[in-house]
Image (tube, rainbow, N blue to C red):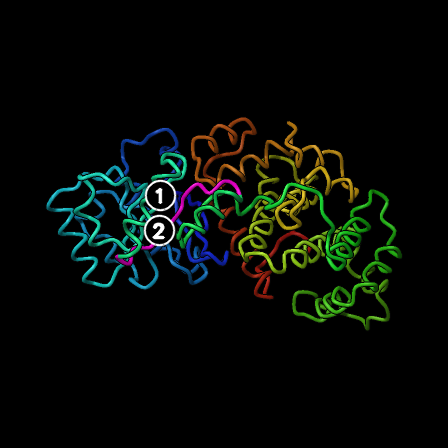
């Protein structure tokens, strides 16, 4: 049986990833059915035990959605207490069995979060066992969001803001005393006004432009790389790594690039430039484009778009550049020359690339119904998608650790 998994990062006030909320479905049949939430919750535990929690969370906490049945059957106790947060769903009816289960989990050392918290008499008996209150900004008023901090933070509860969609959402709740944050703001630019790009980031952007020109001039790419010493070092280090079996002595930067070939140059330069431009940003903001790039490249096969796999890889890499550079995407696209289909997809226009990109976006959000519908339009089997996403996560982790996972496509 296939396992469907999405993960949504949860950030600290310093924009460091604290953990991930993990969203599971046991298979395609769950796309349209919400009648078996207990089965889906049990499947999450099974997936974590089968694949290993470390693979999903990189050593950070995993927030696991828990139904009533999941709690009273004590499924969380099968998982390491120092790696998970038991997230009690807002749909759980509070009764003596649920309270007893939460008491046992708390005494055993588990952390507990109350999802979509609304301060009502019915939910208050759970508060003594809670460590986190997750407040959905879309269903509570600003006044209530502020009151909840005053009411519960003095007792040691951590307030977690959900659906943080804008920089104002983040800054406002941070000022009020929220300490954790979850939402799509973190993959969007903080500033939507034009401003100067730092010189070193501008240099990476120039290299990116030269490498992705339709008629790439390898000598111009070499000159751009030589102007940025960190890129020269990274290129030479890469060519001397196990990922690239060097058969000859590298005599110059142009010679080094010739060993990669045109496709390899575009791929390597794009990857390194985007990663370098992301320095100083939350690690998830660097991880996200790597996952998207590899995920889209892998999806190209079942979508019968193999000839465009390199373009799709670049699309994924560039899709978060607005957040990395704090610029509007149209402004960035004026700075670099890329293929028309990539450009249109990044601007949200409908084309084949955009339709495949939408699958990646929907999967990240755990919108299983949307994934199913979008995949069906491209005749992609549902069962093919989960493993491709996990492969993309593994590959991105390997790239950031300096040990790329096996890659059947030409290496970086």
**Residues shaded magenta:** 155-166
For label 2, the crowd category at 10 Å Cα-Cα, with few meaning under 14, some 14 to 19 and many 20 or more, is many
Q: Position of residue 381 (x, y in %)?
A: 49, 34
Q: Position of residue 166 (x, y in %)?
A: 52, 41
Query: Looking at the image, which residue is at 20% across and 42% down?
Result: 123
Q: Relative to residue 305, is residue 251 drawn left or right? A: right
Give the labeled residue for mark 2: 159
Q: Nearer the viewer, residue 173 or 18?
A: 173
Queried whether the magenta region covers residue 99, the answer comes back as no
Q: Position of residue 105 (x, y in %)?
A: 20, 57
Q: Nearer the viewer, residue 248 or 6?
A: 6
Q: Are marks 1 and 2 in contact (CB under 8 Å)?
A: yes
Say if 229 sits above or below 62 in the image. Answer: below
Residue 135 — which label? 1
Work out which quarter of the rendered image holds the C terminus and state it. bottom right
Q: Relative to residue 164, is residue 344 drawn left or right? A: right
């Amino acid at each position: 049986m296939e396992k469907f998994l999405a993960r949504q990062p949860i950030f600290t006030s310093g924009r460091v990833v604290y953990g991930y909320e993990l969203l599971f479905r046991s298979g395609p049949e769950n796309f349209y059915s919400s009648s078996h939430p207990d089965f889906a919750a049990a499947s999450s535990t099974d997936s974590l035990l089968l694949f290993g929690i470390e693979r999903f969370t990189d050593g950070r906490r995993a927030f696991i959605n828990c139904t009533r049945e999941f709690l009273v059957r004590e499924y969380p106790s099968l998982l390491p207490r120092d790696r998970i947060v038991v997230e009690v769903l807002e749909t759980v009816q509070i009764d003596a069995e649920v309270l007893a289960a939460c008491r046992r989990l708390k005494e055993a050392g588990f952390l507990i979060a109350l999802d979509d918290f609304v301060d009502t008499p019915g939910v208050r008996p759970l508060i003594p066992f809670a460590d986190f209150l997750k407040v959905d900004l879309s269903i509570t008023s600003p006044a209530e969001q502020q009151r909840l901090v005053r009411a519960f933070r003095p007792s040691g509860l951590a307030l977690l803001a959900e659906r943080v969609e804008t920089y104002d959402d983040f800054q406002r709740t941070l000022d009020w005393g929220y300490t954790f944050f979850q939402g799509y703001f973190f993959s969007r630019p903080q500033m939507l006004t034009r401003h100067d790009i730092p010189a070193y980031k501008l240099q990476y952007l120039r290299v990116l432009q030269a490498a992705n020109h339709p008629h790439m001039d390898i000598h111009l790419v070499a000159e751009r790389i030589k102007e940025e010493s960190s890129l020269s070092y990274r290129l030479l280090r890469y060519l001397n790594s196990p990922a690239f079996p060097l058969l000859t002595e590298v005599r110059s930067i142009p010679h080094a690039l010739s060993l990669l070939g045109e496709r390899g140059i575009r791929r390597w330069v794009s990857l390194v430039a985007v990663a370098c431009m992301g320095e100083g940003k939350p690690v998830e903001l660097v991880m996200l484009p790597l996952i998207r790039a590899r995920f889209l490249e892998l999806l190209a096969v079942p979508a019968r778009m193999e000839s465009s796999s390199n373009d799709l890889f670049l699309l994924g890499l560039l899709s978060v550049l607005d957040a990395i550079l704090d610029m509007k995407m149209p402004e960035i696209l004026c700075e670099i020359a890329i293929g028309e289909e990539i450009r249109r997809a990044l601007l949200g226009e409908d084309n084949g690339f955009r339709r495949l990109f939408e699958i990646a976006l929907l999967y990240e959000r755990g919108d299983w119904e949307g994934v199913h519908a979008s995949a069906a339009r491209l005749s992609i089997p549902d069962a093919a998608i989960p493993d491709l996403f996990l492969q993309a996560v593994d590959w991105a982790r390997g790239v950031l650790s300096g040990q790329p996972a096996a890659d059947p496509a030409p290496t970086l």
